[in-house]
Image (spheres, rainbow, N blue to C red):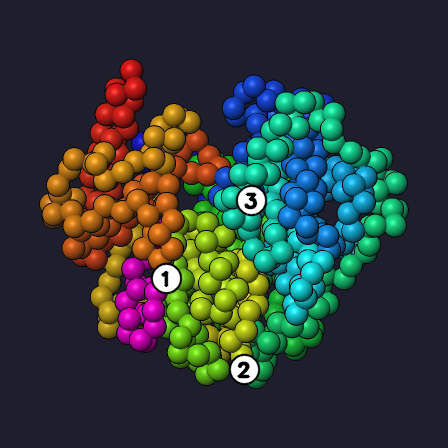
Amino acid sequence: MTRKLSPLAGQSAPISILINVPKLINAYYSHIPDPQDPKQRVIFGTSGHRGSSLDNTFNEGHILAITQAIVLFRKENKIDGPLFIGIDTHALSKPAFETALEVLAANHIEVMIADHDEFTPTPVVSFAILAYNKNRSDHFADGIVITPSHNPPNDGGFKYNPPHGGPAELKVTSWIEKKANDLLAAKCQEVKRLPFAQAESAATTHRYDYLTPYVDALGSVIDMEIIRKSNINLGVDPLGGAGVHYWEPIARRYELNLNIINKAIDPTFSFMTVDWDGQIRMDPASLYAMKKLIEMRNQFDLIFACDTDHDRHGIITRKAGLLPPNHYLSVAIFYLFQHRQKWPQSKVVGKTVVTSQMMDRIARQLGRGLYEVPVGFKWFTPGLMDGSLGFCGEQSAGAVFDRLDGSLWTTDKDGIICALLSAEMTAAFNRDLGDIYHDLENELGQTFYERDDAEATAEQKNILKKLTAKDINDKQLAGEKIEAILTHAPGDKEPIDGVKVINQSGWFVARPSGTEAIYEICAESFRSEEHLRCIISDAQKIVRKALQINIKEKL
């Protein structure tokens, strides 16, 4: 089933769709998840556990169990340094934070909470973990980020970052998930906790300035001087997210002509325009969610936005409007690997299997290697840690890159530095970034990219996740011979939890969503929009056929 646009798409959010915050928070505390219901268990998807208290998928029981499981994981792996914890502005984030702190304090974990009860972006938590662990041989720190990213206001999210600072790898989340569900099944009787007032004042709970060290270090990853000298007129919309109080200190510290368009913090996110499906979603890569900012593009030389936990970016230029993420990532690679003179030639480009092959072409043109991994930023962490990856990006507008001297910045996505890089590039090129991308197309060839979604049951998602080349009998895709069917990423050889089907003129990837009842088809044509439509149509038929065959075999 192809995406169907809601009549509300791109419109100001009507009162009728705004969340009832008291009802949502009351459900967090009063609803008891049923561990016998697979949907209500702890489930770590692509990036942590997500859900809504109204659906019994993100309730106090889940957070009690997950936090105690993290405590046990730390003990099992001898992680005994401080735990850095940050939250975003979703309504469920603060209750989840309070629950988590009650458990952490009862277990005598040294916890670093933000000064003045501030919100903390995901990349800032990663930055803090890495800064603490640098040159350390023991007593390592780790972290928790409480955020459902750009998900709707009803949702909550809970992520664990081990001592490497990035999203936890599969073996870690699997361990935590299993232990948490065991605790949930036992009605959390083995969970230790203190009342919140005692937890907050415990000797192990420490106030920490997340903002200042991060802001002060931005000059080591972005050429702030070229932005300052250009005096380009910049606009930023934090979308009511965790970075809302970071942008003024950044502008002040580096003397940037930067204007904060929207300073509102509202857990209903009523200031947003509605996304494609009729939901409020703080997605900086969505034309519908970004409609107000796109309409403002002539007021600034450049506008950027970040999602609620500030690990994703959206870039709006005067001429191009909202740059598709693949276009921005391509321009960023083209710029960085030519303008970071201290980066060694050995550094390569990292991308996920669903990201545009324009990145492959640029890497080849620049004489750089390419490292392709499954969906999920956790797969980039080893390459970032060992210094082999200079830039990592994914088509959902997430990326990170090294400092000016080639050393590590963070191991998680960072929407703030991606936004600031757009300003650096605009100042350096003295041109619209959309024009730079068109120059690349003229030189390397045009590509046509789209993501399409279809509804899927849990059974269908599980089947799709386990598909192999033998499950696909088709010999052609969009009228051309299928040349390869991949179930593992070329770079790290890890499962892509789906299939990538490739022919001479394009490809598609079909994989189940880690957070929604859908499967995703990402496709790209190297010929035309019409050819792309053919690839997507054939991809839908191929996937449906493979699902039907597998379901029949089970009957």
The C terminus lies in quadrant: top left
Front tag of 3 and 2: 3
Residue at image x 83%, y 50%?
Answer: 204
Is 365 included in the stretch rendered in magenta? yes
Q: Amino acid at mark 1?
A: Tyr
Residue at mark 3:
172
Res 173 seen here? yes
Query: Tags 3 and 2 in contact by the CB under 8 Å rule?
Result: no
Determine the CA span between mark 2 and mark 1: 30 Å
Q: Circle 2: is it few (<14), some (14-19), or many (20+) Cα within 10 Å?
A: some
- Compare marks 1 and 3 and give the one earlier in the sequence: 3
Residue 414 in percent (x, y) is at: 55, 60
Residue at image x 82%, y 54%?
Answer: 206
Determine the CA span between mark 3 and mark 2: 42 Å
Q: Circle 1: is it few (<14), some (14-19), or many (20+) Cα within 10 Å?
A: many
Left or right? Give the position of 391 relative to 62.
left
In the image, residue 55 sits, relative to residue 108, either above or below, namely above
Residue at image x 65%, y 76%?
Answer: 254
Left or right? Give the position of 163 relative to 385.
right
Residue at mark 2:
226
Residue 145 in percent (x, y) is at: 64, 48
Residue 258 in percent (x, y) is at: 61, 70
In the image, residue 52 sits, relative to residue 532, either above or below, namely above
